[in-house]
Amino acid sequence: MLSLRTFLEQHAVSVRRITEPLSINQEITALQHVLEYAPDQPVFYVERPVHNDGRVSTMPVVTNLCADRALTARVLGFEDHRQAALAFTGLIGSPIAPIMIGRSEAPVQEIVLKGEQASLLDIPALRQHEMDAGEYITAGHCSTYERESDVDNTSIQRCLVKGPRLMSIFPYANSHNARNVEGFWRHDEPCPVAIWIGHHPAVVLGAQSKLGYPESHWAVTGGFAREAIRLVPSITHGNKLMVPAEAEIVIEGFIPPHRLEADGPFGEFTGYFGEQIIAPVIEVTCITRRKDAIYHDIGAGLPDHLTPDNMAMEAKVYALACAAAPSVVNVHVPYSGRRFHAYIQFRSPRRGEVRDALVAALSYRRIRTVIAVDDDVDIFNDGDMMWALATRVQWHRDQIRIDGLTHPSLDPSKPIGAATVTKSGIDATMPPSAGSHVPRPFLPILRAKAGPEQKARDILRKLASVEKR
């Protein structure tokens, strides 16, 4: 059975264990900042996190779990991270139904703390950045359900620890969890919630899949894990809210109707601090955990935060673009563009196809700019993309602008009070050829023959091996 600990054992070579005591106040997240643009991203296992009052936590902290694209791809069962768009589409389409088990079999309920025994202050939640409002739970998968259908939803939401049994929660406007909360509030009822923390990356990623509403994530999560997820009834909510038996920690409670409190500032995925807002709160009723629980944290606005979600977004954009243009071969949502840019690669598109695909991709509310290129351009190399923009685009001819489209409120460039934005599609493909056997009307690209290039690679590889000795 997959769990966070089975991943750490199987991929020990990718884990850096930190034995030195590190404060939960910025020191752990600083590890991720130092390596933000490193080509290889290790998983950090901090053995001795230190609380603000000087206590060394009994729970180690794991972070940077999904920061490395190549490792994330291998964990999900495909070798080339460049094929995430196709791979994620296949995984979403291969669900495996979950298995329900009893509480005596569930590791996550080895320890059950109810009422005043439960304290969020014993969890080593991090204050990641200097302007954060406090300690945030950032890898908490918040599970709620729709009041009318009882269909559950799971999504990562940030939670600010406000006291031993109180924290705020920020479900984005119009998100599935936000809809579920509003459904209970319309009847002046508290919304049941269970937040599970710590699991195998395949489970973490599967639970973040972009699905319809209302639609449970558990079967899709099983498809990502390639095994049925074992679920156990939560202590507070019973079968209404099931939680993964192999998780590390579960926080249970209710979101009381219409109660809003201050939340933020907080470091967002954009790389900027988000403003202070008002948000719902969770009144905690119970905390369950493993006896030797490991706390999982996600570095906000860092590769750990963006990499897995961007890979999932690639599948979404790919589906939208392919429906409009069969010549689409791949999609990339680059870290450099946060979640706002998408690159689409085409092979011999017919007239009109590129623009059809650009418009389709721009309908995805998260995306603000889409750039289309031919298959001779490496969409995973920002340098190649800038070369295509510089040499293949005439702005009066190749740019599409669409006004009045929706976009996340966290976009720092969005004018204050604006409900919609202008989005842009850029066609950086070469003009099509006049016929099937006629070359495209464009200058030849500088290239060396395959033989000399391979010889050069072999020489450089030998030099690199000598330097390492």
Image (tube, helix red, strand yellow):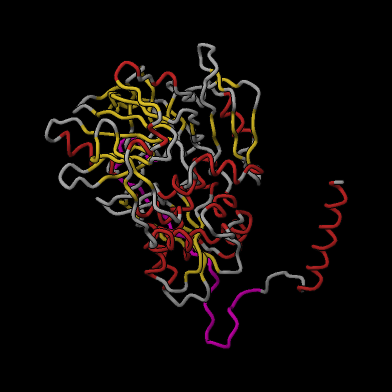
Whether residue 176 is visible, yes or no, is yes
| Residue 61 x, y percent position in the rendering | 53, 29
Image spot of residue 153 (x, y percent):
29, 45
Q: Residue at x 51, y 17 (%)?
A: 51
- Snapshot quadrant of residue 460: bottom right
Q: What is the x, y in percent for residue 66?
A: 53, 44
Residue displayed at 42% across by 36% down: 107
Q: Is residue 138 above or below residue 397?
A: above
The residue range painted magenta reads: 414-443
Residue 309 shown left or right of residue 67 in the figure: left
The one of 459 and 340 positioned closer to us in this rendering = 459
Drawn side of residue 162 relative to residue 29, left or right: left
Residue 430 falls within the magenta-colored stretch: yes
> Residue 298, image x and y in percent?
49, 35
Q: From this viewpoint, which residue is outermost toward the front?
A: 104
- Using the image as rendered, state which of residue 248 and residue 148 is in the foreground: 248
Magenta span: helix, strand or loop, mainly?
Answer: loop
Q: Is residue 355 magenta?
A: no
Q: Is residue 225 left or right of residue 440?
A: left
**Exactly how many numbered labels are in the figure?**
0
* Residue ranking furthest to the left: 187
Q: Is residue 40 above or below residue 398?
A: above
Q: Is residue 61 above or below residue 441?
A: above
Q: Residue at x 35, y 20 (%)?
A: 118
Is residue 276 among what the camera can see?
Answer: no
In this view, 253 is above or below 105: above
Residue pictured at 19% horizontal, 30% vertical: 190
Residue 320, quarter of the rendered image: bottom left
